Image (cartoon, grey):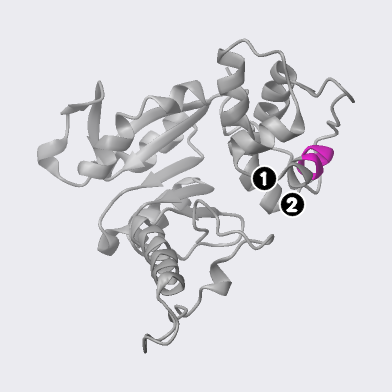
Amino acid sequence: MATGRTHRPATRSRGIPEATVARLPLYLRALTALSERSVPTVSSEELAAAAGVNSAKLRKDFSYLGSYGTRGVGYDVEYLVYQISRELGLTQDWPVVIVGIGNLGAALANYGGFASRGFRVAALIDADPAMAGKPVAGIPVRHTDDLEKIIKDNGVSIGVIATPAGAAQQVCDRLVAAGVTSILNFAPTVLSVPDGVDVRKVDLSIELQILAFHEQRKAGEETPAGDGALPAATPRGTSADQGPDGDVPAVMPA
């Protein structure tokens, strides 16, 4: 079975925009649900609605994949599942290590969707000696002293950081030095990485703050004119958080 060490996805070399790449998992999730219901074909309008985008954007995204559908028939669901999975690199095995097995790390370890999407949790790693050997999701936790050996032995190129903020950069540095080239960061801090290393940041507090901003705006729109209420303030950096197409990404980039 191939691993993440032996193959890299071809999206960048083929010139697929990052905004399109960010939407491919949304399409794949919607298509997988259709496949599970044995739906053979789907129109661009139906698939766009299921993925939460407009149909024109979907058709443009699929044009980068060389998939245009059939007039009057739509898109072949099974073929699109394969095509998008291949483009995302999900037709092979990607071993992943999770560092930091607190509440969040344990929850990630117990997530059942990794295996079905091409990811294998190769190891769970924590700095607490008391955690060493304890099974989480059926996998014994390893101590951080073994981090480099684990990465080498399993050919790991993707690391997940779920540590406290203060430990995240040091963990990141060790992952990168050991050969990890992609990092999913759940720690509430910005990581510094060298060129060639990709970081995706998941910050739940930022997502909640964005929702609070929209709630404040909705409340302001509902306030009757002339009651003395001030207009809702726009948080600093809001425009910088928007994606290339003006959308706020579901996962905030680092």
Q: Residue 17 carries which label?
A: 2
| C-alpha span from label 2 to label 1 | 6 Å
What residue would you read off at disc 1? Answer: 21
Q: What stretch is highlighted in magenta?
A: 59-64
- Residue name at image x 26 percent, y 44 percent: 104
Proximity of marks 2 and 1: CB atoms separated by less than 8 Å? yes
Question: For the image shown, how many numbered marks are present on the structure?
Answer: 2
SS at mark 1 in the image: helix
Q: Can residue 172 be seen in this view?
A: yes
Of residues 35 and 43, which is closer to you in this image? 43
**Amino acid identity at mark 2:** Pro
Rendered image quadrant of residue 131: top left
Let me know if residue 61 is in the magenta part: yes
Quadrant of the image for the N terminus? top right
* Residue 28 placement, left or right of 108: right
Amino acid type, mark 1: Val
Question: Residue 119 vs residue 72: left or right?
Answer: left
